[in-house]
Structure formats: C-alpha cells, structure tokens
Amino acid sequence: LTSKEFDVLALLAEQRGAVVTRERLMDDVWDENWFGSTKTLDVTVGRLRQKLEEHAAPARVVTVRGVGFRLEDEPSDA
C-alpha cells in the first residue's frame, strides 16, 4: 500500500463499522489545508479496494453515498 492508502485504511479500521466522513478523511490523511479535489480521495479508495480484493482481505470499503466510507467485514461463506 502507498502511505495514503495505508492512512485511509488505518483510519477506517479505527472506526470499523462506523461511517468516516469524506471531510474527516481529507483532513486527517491529507491535511486540513488541502485545496485539491476530493477526487484524490476517490482514487485512493478505489486503489485500496482493488488491493484488498487482490489479496482476499476479510474486509471491504463501502461507500456511504453523500457521507463517506465504512470498513466492514466480508460475509463469510458459511
């Protein structure tokens, strides 16, 4: 993972199951003075999702439309 991907994952993991707002992710991972596009966050989350899928991780990043993202456990194949 890149440092930004790791930081996003770490923040989502700290709040596992809860929604982390886009604003909080941008402030905590990039910087409160970041003036770039929030598309940067979307690209980072997209790459993180791809890497989690490639490695069959037991968790996934879910988009909560209009709010942010949540890390949740993948359903088991029971």
Image (cartoon, helix red, strand yellow):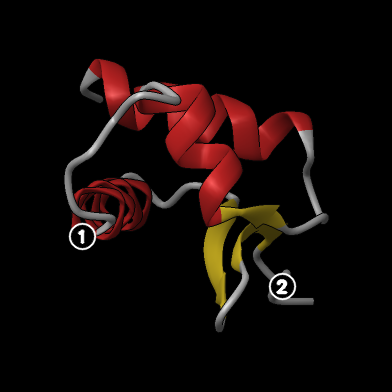
Residue 69 locus on image (x, y percent): 58, 61
Residue 73 locus on image (x, y percent): 71, 58
The amino acid at mark 2 is Pro
Question: Which element type, helix, strand or loop, lies under badge 2?
Answer: loop
Residue 60, quarter of the rendered image: bottom right
Question: To which residue does mark 2 refer?
Answer: 75
Q: Is residue 3 above or below residue 73?
A: above
Point out the image quarter for the C terminus.
Answer: bottom right
Question: Which element type, helix, strand or loop, lies under badge 1?
Answer: helix
User: For this rendering, which residue is in front, 76 or 50?
Assistant: 50
The amino acid at mark 1 is Lys
**Disc 1 or disc 2, which is closer to the eye?**
1
Residue 70, quarter of the rendered image: bottom right
Q: Is residue 69 above or below residue 15?
A: below
Instruction: Of the two numbered discs 1 and 2 on the same chain, state the one appearing first in sequence.
Output: 1
Tell whether label 2 touches label 1 (CB within 8 Å): no
Residue 45 locus on image (x, y percent): 33, 53
Q: CA distance from mark 1 to mark 2?
A: 29 Å
User: For this rendering, which residue is in front, 15 or 65?
Assistant: 65
Point out the image quarter for the N terminus.
Answer: top left
Question: To which residue does mark 1 refer?
Answer: 39
Left or right position of 22 against 31: right
Rendered image: mark on residue 9 = none
Left or right position of 11 against 51: right
Image point 33% across, 44% down: which residue?
55
Q: Is residue 57 above or below residue 2?
A: below
